[in-house]
Image (cartoon, rainbow, N blue to C red):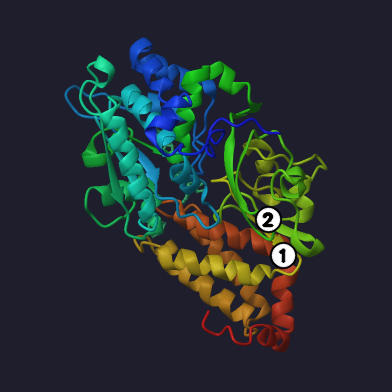
Amino acid sequence: MSKKLLLEKAHVEGIRYYDVYRREGGYRSVEKALKTMGPEAIVEEVKKSGLRGRGGAGFPAGMKWSFIAKPEGVPRHLVCNADESEPGTFKDRYLMEFIPHLLIEGLIVSSFALGSNDTYIYIRGEYAWIVDILEQAIEEAKQNGFLGKNILGTGFDCNIHVQRGAGAYICGEETALIESLEGKRGNPRIKPPFPAVQGLWMRPTVVNNVETLAAVVPIINMGGEEYAKIGVGRSTGTKLISACGNINKPGVYEIDMTISVEEFIYSDEYCGGIPNGKKLKACIPGGSSVPILPANLLLKTAKGKTRYMNYESLGDGGFATGTMMGSGGFIVLDEDQCVVRHTLSLARFYRHESCGQCSPCREGTGWMEKILKNIEYGHGKLSDIDLLWDIQRKIEGNTICPLGDAAAWPVAAAIRHFRDEFEWHVLHPEEAQKRNYGLAHY
Ligand code: NAD
Ligand code: SF4
C-alpha cells in the first residue's frame, strides 16, 4: 500500500474546518518553519526533498525557488496555480475540496520562504464552490494567527487572495495566468524572462501548482531527506493521480511512485481493472497533453522492463516508445474505444483553447481538427495521415507556449502507434460513416 502524505487525513470528518485540521496536527509546519527555520533553510529542505513540480512539467521546485530574484525594495510574490483544466486531471480539485487547510498551510510556509507578503491562488472559474471553501479556510487561518499581520509573533505578514479564472484553459500557463491576474487578456508571454525574474507586475514571482505547495507541508514536518527516501530515483515523495476512463474505480489516488502501471490499473486498491472484462487498449497516463501509449508499451517498455508509475519509467523510450508523467491525469481506453475519435476530441479542445497569438498553433490546431474530422467521418484520404503528421511536426517547438506542443504530441503518438486505425477509417468510409450516425454535431 502506498504511503499517504497528502490525503491521509482527507476523510477525517470535519477536516475541512480549522479546529479538526489543527487537532489532527495541522499547521505544525508553519510553527516549525517560521519559528525555527529561516527562509534559506526552508528552500534547502525543499531542494533536498527532490520535489518536482506537480502541475505537469516536473521542474525541480527547490531549484525554481532558488532562482527567484531579490532586487532591493521590490516585492516578491507566490502564485498558486489552481487553474486545473488539463483534460483528465482533477487531483487539485480533490485536494482543495476535501483538505483545503493543507494547501493554505503549504502556502504560508512557501510564502515565508520566498518573501511573499501577498500570495495569490488563481483558481479555475468552474471550481466556484471551492472558492468558498478556500476563502473560509483562509479566514479561519487568519482568525487563529496563521495569516495576516505578524504571524505567530515572528514579524512576518502574509495575506492570501483568491482570484477566479473565467474559463480559459490557456490561463493555466503560468505567464498567461499572470497576465490574467493583472487584469489583462490571458496571452502567454515569451520566456525568458521567467516569472522568477519578472512575473506578476514585473516583480519576481514563483508560480507553483496546488499539489506542489501542499507537499511542502510533509517536507518541512519530516525533513527533505526523509521525504526523498519515499519513491524512487528522481521521482521522490508521493504523487496524486486522477484516474478516469474505462476503469472500475475512477477517482483520485495518492501513490508513492514505486508501483507498476499494471498494478495501478488492475489492483483493487487503485483502478480495480477494466469493466466487463474488456481488454486494455491504450492509456494517456499524464493528462491529455502527453503521448498516448498502446497496452503493450504501457505495461512494459520496448526493452521488456516493467513500467512504473513515475517520471523516469513512464518516460523510458522517449516519445518513440514512451510517454510522460505529466499532471497525473490517467485516462484508460478499453478495446472498444476509437483512437481516431479520441484524437479528434483532443484536437477540437486545443483548437478551441488556442489563444491565437502564434500562427503554427492558431492555424495548425484548426487544420488538424478538420483533417481528423474528415478521417473520422469517412471522408479522408490516405495522404491525409501524412499531412497530419507534417502539420503536427511544424507546430512542435515553434510556438510561444507549450499549448502548441500539447496539441501536436497526442496527434503524433496516435499516428505512430495506431496508424492502422486511421487507415481503416479511410479504407472503410461507409462503415466509418455508419459508426458515426447521429454524431454529426461533432
Ligand atoms: P516549463 O517546462 O516551461 O516550466 C516549468 C517551470 O519551471 C516554470 O514555472 C518555469 O518558469 C520554470 N523554469 C524553467 N526554466 C527556468 C529557468 N531557467 N529559470 C527560472 N525558472 C525556470 O513548463 P510549463 O509551461 O510550466 O508547464 C507545462 C506543463 O504543464 C505541461 O507538461 C502540461 O502537462 C502541464 N499542464 C498542466 C495543466 C493542469 O491542469 N495541471 C494544464 C495545462 C498544462
Ligand atoms: Fe497562444 Fe497557442 Fe501560441 Fe500558446 S502556442 S501562445 S496558446 S497561439
Q: Label 1 sits on what residue type? A: Phe
Mark 2 residue element? strand
Q: Residue at x 23, y 35 (%)?
A: 203
- Relative placement, left or right, of 15 versus 236 is left
Mark number, residue 418: 1
Residue 227 or 28: which is nearer the viewer? 28
- Relative placement, left or right, of 62 versus 262 is left
Instruction: Answer with the quarter of the image where residue 315 lies.
Output: top right
- Relative placement, left or right, of 102 versus 9 is left
Mark 1 residue element? helix
- Position of residue 148 measured from the top left corner of the image (x, y, whole percent): 23, 28
Instruction: Answer with the quarter of the image where residue 162 lies.
Output: top left
> To which residue does mark 2 refer?
283
Residue 374 appears in view: yes
Residue at mark 2: C-beta within 8 A of ligand 1:
no
- Position of residue 244 measured from the top left corner of the image (x, y, whole percent): 62, 56
- Position of residue 397 measured from the top left corner of the image (x, y, whole percent): 49, 52
Of callouts 2 and 1, which one flags the residue occurring earlier in the amino acid sequence?
2
Q: Residue at x 63, y 50 (%)?
A: 285
Q: Residue at x 31, y 31 (%)?
A: 141
Residue 364 appears in view: no
- Relative placement, left or right, of 399 versus 143 is right
Mark 2: give few (<14), some (14-19) or many (20+) Cα within 10 Å. many
